[in-house]
Image (cartoon, rainbow, N blue to C red):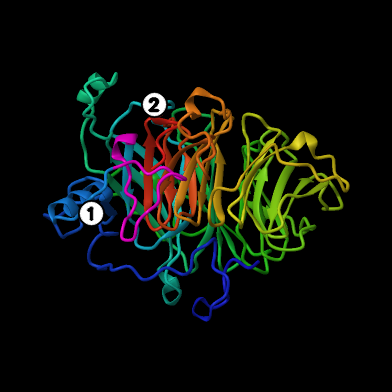
Amino acid sequence: MSKRSADAEGGGAPLKGGDRPEPMDIDDNKDMGEFEDEFEDEFESEDEILEAGVDGRPDAEREAEEAAASGMEVDNGTFIVGRNKLEEGQHLAPDLGTYELLHNLSTPWPCLSFDIIRDGLGDKREKAYPATMYAVAGTQAEASKDKENQLMVMKFSGLSRMERTDDNDSDSDDDDNDEQADPILESKSIPLTSTTNRTRVHQIPSQDPSVPGQTFVATMTESAQVFIHDITPHLASFDNPGTIITPQQNKPVSTIRAHKSEGYALDWSPLVPGGKLLTGDNDGMIYMTTRTEGGGWVTDTRPFQGHTSSVEEIQWSPQEASVFASASSDGTVRVWDTRSKSRKPAITVQVSSVDVNVMSWSRLTTHLLATGDDNGVWSVWDLRQWKGGDEKPAPIASFNYHKDQVTSIEWHPTDDSMVVVAAGDNKVTLWDLSVEIDDEESKDTAGVKDMPPQLLFEHIVEHAKEVHWHPQIPGTLVATGSEFSVFRPIPIVYGVAVK
């Protein structure tokens, strides 16, 4: 099933559940998006800067207050899936009391894909507010404005904790010390002439602790080319105001031209420090690119072949340096060994009757693999049961909750029972596979129609495309859709706070 029509105005299947975006109302003489300083119209610098709301509050909170002021009836009750039903004219708004962190930030065009960049600010920063984080994303401009596309190296800062009013909050002393700030998104833009289908980061640590390592970004585009950029200077420039990024630094250090069609599958090996990249396309071809000792990049022209339709996702094994898995719109997941001279899959398993869009390989329990398909079903598989042949193993868990295709799925980096899922029904859902029906935490949801007890939290993101856990700020998630959403549910509400 093709994910993008050849001509966006000529119909056809959309990419990951979303048509070409409508042009946004942007003044080229102002900053990147709708969040601007209400008292200042000029740039503060050459860099592009956004502020999330003129008063720093989430849109939902501000809209609810405006609705109340205008005399509109606002229902502040909790919406429970299976128990409640939206009446005509009603809309869901987030229960702000269930969030520790919630900020939305806009970009000139929507981003189909992004990746979080690990930083030097430390790990386990769950109480470090206002929070700062770094990411890279590629845009999907309107079809007639492809030349406006860009690869955005971003710094999110001023991400303040939600104000707490509960006197019994055990962290109230910490709250008093939290600095309140306006959320800001700074961006260094690398020009592209095509939509980014997927982008992924690879970081090479320096052997000298006093010297920063290198950060590379691979970008798979609609043009069928894959670009590798060194964004090390772009990241450094955030801490050195006035730094000018040169045109040469914006050029890719390597361009992969092996693919004859566009693709969406892209992954760096976590076990090869120098850099080893897999890319898969709509023709079912998978190519491997490796960084040489001299710092160059070489693509093996012999593709891995086996899928009968487009390769939608690739994941390297977190444990075996020569093993990877691929998911396809042919409904299969295939496991490969790069040492095989035949370039054929070692194991093929039919996991769905429709497109398998996304996949995630657990970094903690390495025999667990999660998949998400076009019907909105996501499943967990035990790779120890995959023996090959005609045998069709069953998933150890499967959930048919989402009402549209799954567009992103990811295991928690430090908890092998936690999974986050994004789908085309505008939902990002948080799941705990350790929850059983008879657990104390699930009494409020057990027996409720269409609500699995493993469902912990639901967050609305319009046109949700991709979601990632932040590896250094525990429990914090970043999602992209019509805009970026940075949020962290309050841990004590897990299991009951579905809005």
Of callouts 1 and 2, which one flags the residue occurring earlier in the amino acid sequence?
A: 1
Question: Where does residue 146 sit, x and y in percent of width and height?
Answer: 45, 72
The residue nearer to you, when weighing 287 against 265, is 265
Q: Indicate the quadrant containing the N terminus: top left, top right, bottom left or bottom right.
A: bottom right
Q: Disc 1 on helix, strand or loop?
A: loop
Residue 45 has which mark?
1
Point 27% across, 52% down: residue: 50
In this figure, which residue is indicated by the disc labeled 2? Answer: 492
> Which stretch is magenta?
77-100
Does the magenta-highlighted stretch encompass residue 315? no
Q: Kindly tell me whether residue 292 is visible in this rendering.
A: no
The residue nearer to you, when weighing 398 against 23, is 398
Q: How many marks?
A: 2
Give left or right: position of 169 versus 320.
left
Q: Give the residue type that dot 2 points to.
A: Ile
Point 24% across, 55% down: residue: 35
Does the magenta-highlighted stretch encompass residue 90? yes
